Image (cartoon, rainbow, N blue to C red):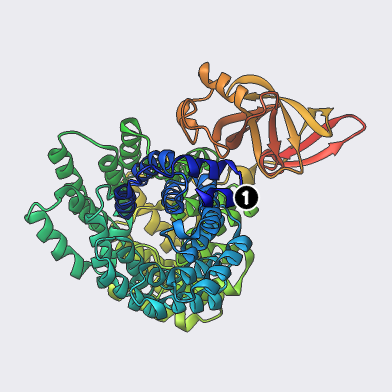
Amino acid sequence: MKILHKITCSALLFAFASNINAKPKTDDLGTAAAEISKSNFTAAVNLMTSYISNNDFDPQAYYYRSVAELGIGENDLALKDADLAIQLLKKLPKNGRVKQADLYLQRAKCNRALGYNTEAMKELNYAASIDNTLSDIYVEMGEIYASNNDFKGSDSTFSKALLYNSKNYNALMGLAKIYIGNDKNREAIQKLYQAIAVDGEKTEPYLLRYKANLNLNNYERAFDDISYVATNNEDYNPYLADLSNAASKCRNYSIPKIDQKIKADDNTVLWLQCRAAVDNKTGKFESAIEDYNRLEQILGEKYAITSAGKGDCYYQKGDYNTALTMYKEANELEETATANAGIARILLLQNEPGEALVYANKAVSLDPMNYEYYYLRGNVQERRKLIGEAISDYEVGMQMNANYAPLYYRRGVLKKSKWDFERVVKLETTPSATENYKPFAYLHLGKKADGQKAVNVILNEYPNAENYYTAASFYAAVNDTTNALKSLEKSFELGYRNFPQVDSDKNLDSLRAKASFITLVDKWKQSSGVSANFAKTDKKNSQKAMVTTEVKFRREQQKFAVNCKLNGIEITCQIDTAATTGTISVADAMFLTKYGFIQTREWSQDPYKDKTESTIVTIRELEIEGIKVKGLMMKVVNDIYAKLQLSKNDIAKFGNINVNNQRNILLIEHY
């Protein structure tokens, strides 16, 4: 017992003394390690907690529990256990079966998970001074450099990790990610092949390789990779859009493979959805509708995805009334982003941008990571003359997909940005069945001849109705009346029916006074039975004079307070010209929801279950002195006493605002 006299009287070491004769269950440590390797982190935590209750002097147990806690996101607890393990190993070095470098590496991982990158880097450097051959140290360093967008630092440290362990999966994946982010797609693909050789069961390398191949226009390889990802995930829905996108880029390659899958009854529901989406993208609308109908037969009932899919087909065909019916049917079955986006597009055709915004907002709230919905909402904001908000939406979309050319084209038009048009030319390396902006980008760059060549390439690859209309628009823009009229007539013959686009397309202005153009368009409108809703142009604002409405206000805490109606109920709102986001208190939002003034579907999350700090409520209509604005998005705040607050962006939607401080009146100039 002499050794006990040399030990300090800390509570931890008293515990060690009291348990010194207890027989350690070392098999529990092995079991915990096995559970961690299988990502069964909760089981490992429970096992190590039980083990520590009898053996609280073992640093390896705290280390394992820290690793498991980090695996389930308990980062603070993981850091505490890493600290304890290090303290124990320092005081009882002979009692530990875990390496000191591993403990400092673990504490660095905990600090990084908590956002303490500076502390993490210090720990990693210390761990490297103990054992500079531990490859995971350099992986962690690489992740920190990557988070700071330091390509050189992350490249060198990930590569150093591979020097000590050429099969380090995380180092290979780290390199692949930074290579893709820096347009080094071929280098990324090489590393991903190596990662797959190390662990071929994970789908992440295939998903990254899909993105790299897509960036290189290797569409067939991209299709094969995303096919693997979709078929090896129980929930394939998140990958369906990417799958159909890749398939549509190499239809001659993908469709035979898809047909074979369907014939073999190999995940038929997935592949029917994919084939329908591809046919829709490539202009084979009747075939797509047949597949959606077949899906409903197989599933035994209608689903939102099939109704919305048919809505997309009818929309592309120009049958907007049937499309609207399909989208509404989809929303009745289950409200989806796709259906709301479809309704928003049709409302735009009906020249109802205010109403369209309500549905575009809903599409964004239901699928906030879909760049196409930000593009759609940007279009809506353009029509509402809110250029700043349109640009903002386009730029959010760019953050999600830096390779979607239409986003750059629209921003280029609004900002008169040469760089954006050059980006469009760089991105559109191959023509598309429905969206081609390269010819017009060339026009904005002053390269008419290159634009003409681009039109020829598009028509050679996809001679469909949409692209003949693109050709007509291009020729009209360069005052080539003969080719413009020929292309327009060809587009009508092939089924183009987007007459609101024809009526509002500024490129066609050079044709509007010509009898041949008027006769051609009227002929096809009459034969198509176009309703007034879809044929009218947005002239009402230009025909109206601006009017000024006076709104009385009160000052409350350096803010303007005015009376308004929210979805028909009277309420007071404040205007904060310094704020960029409107807010509503959780108390008001829940009260209005309880009594039906706000619908639960107008919340971005279930108000009775999932409210978070980022919860958004969409206000159908807010009225101030007879001026109505639809689709305002309000952030829900936990302050129960907070009043409805409009931001500077919200109030701008009512019109041009001036303040008469002497009379305490807001002057709103509007149509």
Residue 247's spot in the image, x, y percent?
Answer: 25, 64
* Vertical order, 435 against 71 (above or below): below
Which residue position is annotated with label 1?
385
- Quarter of image, res 431: bottom left
Helix, strand or loop status at disc 1: loop
* Vertical order, 78 against 208 (above or below): above
Residue 475's spot in the image, x, y percent?
Answer: 44, 72
Q: What residue lies at 17% left-to-right and 63% top-to-bottom?
A: 255
Q: Is 9 displayed left or right of 199 in the figure?
A: right
Residue 302's spot in the image, x, y percent?
Answer: 22, 35
Q: Is 227 displayed left or right of 83 in the figure?
A: left
Q: What residue lies at 45% left-to-right and 53% top-to-bottom?
A: 63
Q: Nearer the viewer, residue 457 or 480?
A: 457
Q: Is residue 49 visible?
A: yes
Q: Nearer the viewer, residue 178 or 242?
A: 178
Outermost residue toward the top in this view: 595
* Vertical order, 182 against 99 (above or below): below
Outermost residue toward the bottom in this view: 449
Q: What residue lies at 34% left-to-right and 50% top-to-bottom?
A: 29
Outermost residue toward the right in this view: 662
Sort mark 1 into few (<14), some (14-19) or many (20+) by Cα contacts within 10 Å. Answer: few
Q: Is residue 509 visible?
A: no
Q: Is 85 displayed left or right of 287 in the figure?
A: right
Q: Nearer the viewer, residue 663 or 637?
A: 637
Residue 363's spot in the image, x, y percent?
Answer: 45, 43
